Image (tube, rainbow, N blue to C red):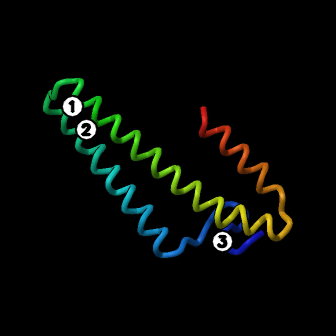
Amino acid sequence: MNNNCKNHKTKKREEKEYKDLINRLNRIEGQVRGVKKMVEEDVYCPDILIQVSAINSALNSFSKVLLDNHINTCVVENIQKGNMEVIEELTATLKKIMK
């Protein structure tokens, strides 16, 4: 098992990756708060739905970045060390997120 993904439970991220992920989540959080305010203010449904679509897009983008980072660090490092179980884990994760 590599140092970055001990028991697949934690991962020490590089500062740049960490900041990027947190910034993306902060923007998403702000978007969700904005939609909540729109509902509270009785904004017209299609306008809210457009904002919800933007949130879904932002979450998908976050997931793609996180998956890319995971493949290029944890998965690659485990394969290089001969731990092929990481491929089964990746496949299972992809099945879960591609519902």
Separation of marks 3 and 2 at Cα, in angstroms = 36 Å
Residue hosting label 3: 4
Secondary structure beneath label 1: helix
What residue occupies the far right of the structure in this picture?
A: 82
Residue hosting label 2: 35
- The numbered disc on residue 39 is 1
**Residue at x 39% of width, y 55% of height:** 25
Say which amino acid is labelled 2. Val
**Neighbour class for label 2 at 10 Å: few (<14), some, many (≥20)?**
many
Separation of marks 1 and 3 at Cα, in angstroms = 42 Å
Secondary structure beneath label 3: loop
Cβ–Cβ under 8 Å for marks 2 and 1: yes
Looking at the rendered image, the disc whose residue lies closer to the viewer, 1 or 3, is 3
Cβ–Cβ under 8 Å for marks 1 and 3: no
Picture coordinates of residue 64 (x, y %)? 53, 51
Front in this rendered view, residue 86 or 61: 61
User: The N terminus appears in which quarter of the rendering?
Assistant: bottom right
- In the visual, does 39 lie left or right of 72? left
Separation of marks 2 and 1 at Cα, in angstroms = 6 Å
Say which amino acid is labelled 1. Val
